[in-house]
Amino acid sequence: DTAEGGAFMMFFLSANMGVDSFFFLSGFLLSLITLKELRARAGKINVAWAVGLRYLRLTPSLVLAMLVYWQIWPHLAYGPFAKRFQDSIYNRCTSWWWSELTYTMNFTPFDSDKVCMGWTWYLGDDMIFFVIGMIAVPMYYRKRALGWIFIACITAASLGICTWLVGNYHLSTYIFDDHYKEYSYYAYSKPYTRAPAYLIGVGAAWYKDVLDQRGITRETRPNSPAARIGAWVLALLAVGLLVFIGGIVVTDFGSHKNSWGTATSAIYIAFSRPLWALCLAVITLLCGLGYLPAIDAFLSSKVWTPLARLTYGAYLLHPLVIKLAAGTAVQYYTFSVQDMLYHWMGNVVMAFGSSAVLWALIERPVMTFSSAMLKKKPQSAKPSMSMQSVASPLSPMTPAESRTAAAAC
């Protein structure tokens, strides 16, 4: 009750929207770079090669993380929680390790609580969205209206399914009782409820392409005082909506827990994530057009390049750090903001430190190997997808790609 009633809870609850930020960014990058590749290669594309290359880039690091988690981590546990920690790993990974390698962990097992490494559900969704994106972008390239109709239909279907699931199973945002367990089981990690944010990223890149085709670029954009003021008003509205989406959920917690009705929960769960992605699209496009130079410079800074290279490894390994700390604890945690910040800083340092080792042992060699494969392939049969075009915000990124993602230009 103390935690639920605190102002800090708003930031804690809105953190899960970060996943949709990655979905948006992944869709935007895929669409933006693939369009450039299509135009450079007269519309030719090898979808199977692109999917295979992406699998090669992502899977070795995933396999090593899973082996460490499954075969080594249980032996490091000690204390009163060690048995529970060990059983939770063995029960999940012994039966379902293979679903990690096939990226089917959101369907086999259907219950996300039984997945070997539950946090990898994102990779399963993103792999499916990648394939959808590789179908959608060539559609747009050949006939724009067809591409827009394709992603609009998938988005509408996803919103409808999500709304139906919330209404049929009375799902809710409240995370401290069975509501969260039911939400996780039926909707949270399923690709048919999470697609809109990704597709908004795809559409944002298409809208940028439309502006480019009309001659509206960073250099030629309207630069009147009215245009600049209008851009800042849009940006402030987007930021305000982001804060609202992240904060409004606290009205269903604390002394008001489970106060939302089914209709309110359905609206929030189905539409908050697409709206979040839409706000990011507004800010991204305004940065790309040069209307927000300070934000653009900050997000485009080369300072972020090392962290961009380590993002995928940190994503895979940070739960290992958190879970091992819990598996070796000698008593239950007690909540305080100071204690949470203390653990957060330790988790960040350990996660990115471990990610640096993973990058040196696996990611960098795999990138070198896959680049060599591309160079050896005959020019006539060379795939139409570059190394950057098969990356996502959670996959290894080149410096140029990380700056493209940040500046969106």
Image: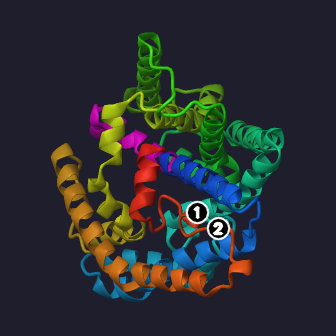
Most common SS among magenta residues: helix
Residue shown at 26% from the left, 81% from the top: 78
Give yes or no for residue 6 being in the magenta stretch: yes
Give yes or no for residue 391 being in the magenta stretch: no
Q: Would residue 14 appear left or right of 147 to someone viewing this image?
A: left
Instruction: Identify the amino acid type marked 1.
Output: Ser
Of the numbered discs in the image, which one, if any, rests on residue 389?
Answer: 1
- Kindly check if marks 1 and 2 are in contact, taking CB atoms under 8 A apart as contact: yes
Q: Secondary structure at mark 1?
A: helix
- Neighbour tally class for label 2: few under 14, some 14-19, many 20 plus, Cα within 10 Å: many
Q: Write down the residue under mark 2.
A: 385
The residue range painted magenta reads 1-20
Image coords of residue 138 (percent x, y): 76, 54
Hey, which quadrant is residue 326 in on the image? bottom left
> As rendered, which of 182 and 270 lies closer to the eye?
270
Image coords of residue 237 (percent x, y): 45, 20
Q: How many marks?
A: 2
In the depicted structure, whether residue 157 falls above or below residue 368: above
